Amino acid sequence: MPSLSDKLKALGVQIGPQNLTPTKARKPEYGIQQVLPGEEVENLYGLAYRITEQYAVDERYGLVELRFRTPPELIAQYCGVPDLERSSADRYVFIDTETTGLGLGSGIFAFLIGLGYYREDYFIIRQYFLRDPGEETAALTALSEEICADPVLVSFNGKAFDVPMLNNRYILNGLSSPFDSSIQLDLLHLSRRLWKDRLPSRTLINLEGNILAAQRTEEDVPGWMIPQLYKDYLHTGDARLVKNVFYHNARDILAMVGLLNYVGGMLTSPLDQSKRDGLDLASIGSLHERFNRTAEAIELYNYALKQDLPPEVFESTLKRLSFLHKQSGDWQQAISLWELAAQQGQVYACEELAKYYEHNQRDYSAALKWVEYALTMIAGRPQAILWQPALEHRRQRLLRKTG
Amino acid sequence: MNGNPDALDRLFARWEKDEQFQEKISAWRKISPRTARYAPFPPDISLEIQNHLASLGIQNLYAHQVVALDELRQGNNIVMTSGTASGKSLVYQLAILNSLLKRPQTRALLIFPTKALARDQYNKLATFLDSARISGLPDLTPPAVAVYDGDTPNHTRTQIRQQAKVLITNPDMLQVGILPHHTRWAEFFSNLEWVVLDEIHIYRGVFGSHIANVLRRMKRITEFYGSSQQFILTSATIGNPAEHAERLTSLPVRLIEADDSPSGEKHFLLINPPITDPELGLRRSLAQETQMLADELYTYQLQTLIFARSRRTVELLVHGLQTLLPASKNALNVRGYRSGYLPGHRRAIEADLRSGEARLVIATNALELGIDIGGLDAVLIAGYPGNIASTRQQAGRAGRLGTSKSLVTLIFGSQPLDQFIARHEAYLFANNPEKALINPDHPVILFQHLLSAAYELPFRSDETFGGLTEVDLREILQLLVSQGKLHFARDKYIWMDESFPAADISLRNASADRVRIQSNGQTIGITELSSAYWMLHPQAIYLQEGNSYFVQSLNLETLTAEVLPVEVDYYTEPKREVEIQINQVLQSQQVIGATKFSGELTVITQITGYKKVQWGTYANLGLGVVDLPPVRFQTEGYWQVIDPETVEILRDQGLWANDRNDYGPEWKFLREIVRKRDAYRCQVCGTMESGIPHHVHHKIPFRAFTSSTEANQLSNLVTLCPACHRRAEQSVRIRSGLAGLGYALVNLAPLLLMCDLADLGAHTDPQSTLAAGSPVVVIYENIPAGIGLTRELYSRHGELVNYAQELVAGCTCEDGCPACVGPGGESGFGGKQPALALLYALCGKDPARALS
């Protein structure tokens, strides 16, 4: 009987060695302990390997100090967890993993799990590394033991990837996950919100370059190379292959710290830095608006409108500001903004003005003037489809009212 | 909507007086009505459930349902084969509800072969449960009962994963969307008690072999979570339901085959269209006969479902009937139904069937599955569906509420299989339908799922998988380790690759690619790439619901076909060329008159052109050329090489029609001159002769000339190597006894195997390079890598040849017809007699009998 592999070969299915570097004798001088000195921790499931770095909190990452300085009440508001208002720095755990592939299938695992947390005047980075995939159970157990009870997990895309992926691994190893119901602060979502207009790419590495002005050295590796490097390490035992992955992981964690502090600073004192970008001010304004801090939002929108904004951001910021004024009943401010917008061809502004004159002032002819102005503006243009029926309806009503 | 029993009686009365009609009938069986047998609820079904059923009008169960529930109570797996509307779903609904009452955390998985069927069953289940006010039952409103498939919106998926108790899905979603992500379903798999697998007769061949492996993967996963399942399967009537169920699930399964549901009187009419041309053996076409009958049923106001054998025939019939019944076009009550229509469109047609709005629906076997369309007055099966299970499923669509009278008419086509059954009707009614074959250990299929299984959970070094022993499995896993896909550590093979192997598996097709059919920027349909080559080649007329579209382009990179709606009086038939190479001979044996082989082949097919055929007259309006790349695939085949002695005997008696024409006395000499002139080189590929002389080919076919002198002018002759010669000859194919033999064999193969005709192809060559110039008949599987169909044929060669001999000898045509060795006429002369002589020779009989 031919074996399965023979049959497959006969059918032209490619299995078997393919461009693999031949296994050489393992060189002890390039073992993990030599290249990346660390410690072994033992638990019920065997040994786990980890390395530790320590930074004083007054060190900087790019422009920003590592010290935890985001007001917890802001975080409480953002996460919607009031309890966090009184949280202290040591409850925050920064987390980032390096994995064997993408996706959340059960065939993907983290071979390097980096944690960052504050202890007194230090920021600690601890990286658990699987010298061999068989160490996973021990490593996950050690991780559970190290993490404080009820942590706030700070990550970059951890909500959608790192945390569910780790939860999968705990399940597969028959362990219960310490992250099951953790509060999460995902900086990816926050960054998208803040920099969607300003930065074309909001990957962590782009943010740290553009926002934190931090630079990585040549030691860094691009993310897509990482799975293959680990594979090669397993194959050769040469830890130099993964050294840069440790660097990459640690930098990602530091960048998260920097980013969180930067955002915290932006929210507490947005006008601090005179050179703050108008786009940032508009974004922070909208974040304040979301938190119902109307006064702050109005102030920031006003500042932003004085900067050099791209036309579409200018228009949307002006619109948001006008509606904030409308909500707080500050009609004079709203009207002057709408008149400005109407001049620039904004149909919504004409409609708002018409509403104002019709319902607040009962000045039907003024209202009619704005409706007719809008109708002329859109005549023969694509927006007509959107606006024409409502405007026409309003016009008919106003015509009746004006007799 | 009530049936129309009077109309049926009036129609029967008319037919009885119609002599012409009587002549067409090859059988008229009356199947007596069956009265229901009821039995009390089994004691373990809770009173709350019984009361709930009573409130829905269900006071009793059919006896077979109670037997099924008893088996389940004893912890057995079951497969039920009772007919349409016999209450199979109620059995699993009750079993699941009862478990949920006892153990609220119970989970159940319901797998339906198609998305459409899953939705249909979901709606029924939701209605059933929605009215459930059974105390003690956990909340079963969505998402506790949910469909999880490609159409499930992303934002509801997490909720379903966490909360679904009864999950409805299809095999594709299970294998690619659920199993590889089992950790996200940990709760579900830990408590999974019931697996329902509906319509398992569909899971045969490639599809079934995949499903068996998907279930192997699921079993590894549920074992990991420490749960075990009971299986409830349903099937149409097949020859081996229990065996098939056991091969799919790798578990012992009890067969419940009784059917105690009521059914009305059913008339089963077999119609063989009359012979219109006795010499050529031509019968009135299946399409014409179907249209005539459909016209009559429509006029008698009988709601009718017509089953056509192909998507293309559906369109031809819709077009024909809408023309024939002008009033229907406006009323929109003559409709088509097939895969390739958009889902919403199909749902609308199903609803119109239920409401009675649609009077005449022409469908492919897509409507054969259990989608609820209500019962119909009449079912018209246009052409034998290829196996008994399908025939019975389709017939089961006739009959309302199981009690009123209904009609099933099977109209035979001119294919050999149809005509064989027309003359052996007992085959259809005897209780021995074909077996469903699967090969869960098909190397390529097994290997694909092995990769996925390794992704899902690491293999331990003492594990087995499917038919693989520990040793076999370790060997293959070690290979994967050396390739870097797996890493071996602490007795486990851990997945170490960035790929997602489940995504590369296509459960039904060789390729997962789909082509989008666009008209004026709108998608009007979708079809698989392999069909697109012949349905949507440039300049083809693509038909959908009676409308014609001209194919402007087929883009194989973007996988889109651009079509334009047109009004034309013709349709197109693709022309395809086939070339075969042998990769490896697996078995061979001397048989009577020939040597049979089975082995691995490469089949190269190419659509090279098309023929325009006029509607109605079927006149050939011209040919077109198409430039599409050839498609190569590896498969298995069975072929026979006819012994030189056999050829000699036939030749002596003038019964070998595969020889070249008599090229005249100077031919031998001329051949020398031409070869010498061409420097003994093939003038197409440039190959030099080596030992065996090259062929000399007539550029304009010999038969096109009146004298050999004219045909044999040197300018008309050219030297070609055998391979190039064969290609050149393919365009001028000569009908011969050999081709007739191939035609009969491949067409009768479904008598032995439960397969579709489209699963097999035939290729014949009187001077084959596959057999050093000997005559050869190849039957190959259209399934990449093959599924064991031709191995089965190889081992049953004798039976097959005998069936074919019986068929051809019994055919009344004079010199070949579509029902025996293929049509004569256009493609050549002298087909039947030599084919029959060859068949006699292969059966060990005297070939000279073919002369009488």
Image (cartoon, coloured by chain):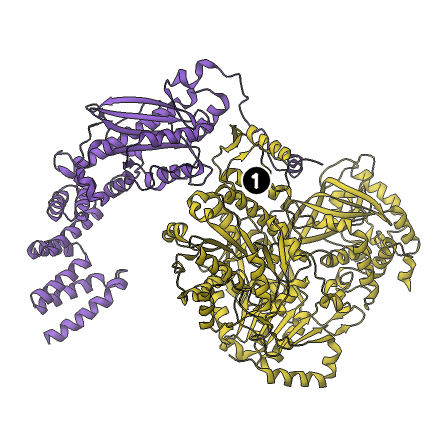
Look at the image and tell me in which quarter the C terminus of chain B lies: bottom right
Q: Nearer the viewer, residue B196 or B585?
A: B196
Q: Position of residue A273 (x, y in %)?
A: 13, 33
Please give the count of numbered marks on the rendered protein: 1
Which residue in the structure is indicated by mark 1?
B450
Q: Is residue A126 visible?
A: yes
Q: Indicate whether A63 appears above or below B49.
A: above
Amino acid type at image mark 1: Leu
Q: Residue at x 31, y 38 (%)?
A: A201
Q: Considering depth in this image, is A302 or B63 the residue closer to the camera?
A: B63
Give how far across and how far down residue B633 sits, in percent: 64, 45
Question: Quadrant of the rendered structure where residue B673 is?
Answer: top right
The picture's colour for chain B is yellow
Residue B495 locus on image (x, y percent): 50, 34
Q: Is residue A269 left or right of residue A10?
A: left
Q: Which chain is purple?
A: A
Q: Closer to the camera, B84 or B151? A: B84
